[in-house]
Amino acid sequence: MIGILFIFICGGFSIFFNFNEFLWNSTPTFLGILTTIVYLLSWIFVGSFMGWKGRKLFNLVITFYWGMGILAYMIGSNFPRSILYPTYAFMVLLCFGPLYGLAYHLSIRNYLVLTIALAFIPWMLSLLSYFIGKYLRKYR
């Protein structure tokens, strides 16, 4: 639980420093890129910690989190006049706003493919670090 809270705190800082650039699709600042890197590192840290502790639920939680982010983007982009659009927009901002420093520098122009790539990167980083943490615990 502490690990997920840590990720949300790092994500909040990253959203704060990337929000204007994310909103206007402009070049991210150095601080925005730095907070994106810290956000990705927090996924690695928390993933390895959860693997070390043997928290199997972590894999399900992160898969659900990134899956819901992709789903929110797909629904929100196809139904922009929906009454639930603010909810979709908030979920997309929560999931992908912290990654704007990375998203801007990827040369992917299709937003759906970009969204999937942005979800895949931290998801795989956290899964790999989870299994590395689990391996290190087993063979220490």
Image (spheres, rainbow, N blue to C red):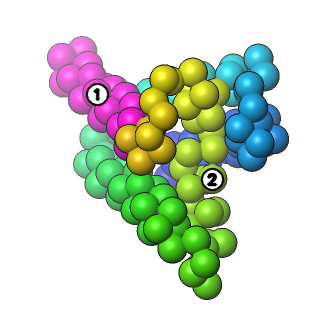
Disc on res. 128: 1
Q: Which residue is mark 2?
A: 93
Q: Could you tell me residue 130's position as x and y percent?
A: 31, 32
Judged from the image, the secondary structure of the residue bearing numbered disc 1 is helix
Residue 36 seen in render: no
Q: Amino acid at mark 1?
A: Leu
Give the dominant element type of the magenta stretch: helix, strand or loop.
Answer: helix
Q: Earlier in the sequence, mark 1 or mark 2?
A: 2
Q: Is residue 72 magenta?
A: no
Other-residue count near label 2 (Cα within 10 Å), few / some / many at <14 / 14–19 / ≥20? some
- Could you tell me the amino acid type at mark 2? Leu
Q: What segment is highlighted magenta in the picture? A: 115-140
Q: Position of residue 27 (x, y in %)?
A: 74, 25
Quarter-of-image position of residue 131:
top left
Residue 17, by quadrant, is top right
What is the x, y in percent for residue 94? 61, 53
- Helix, strand, or loop for circle 2? helix
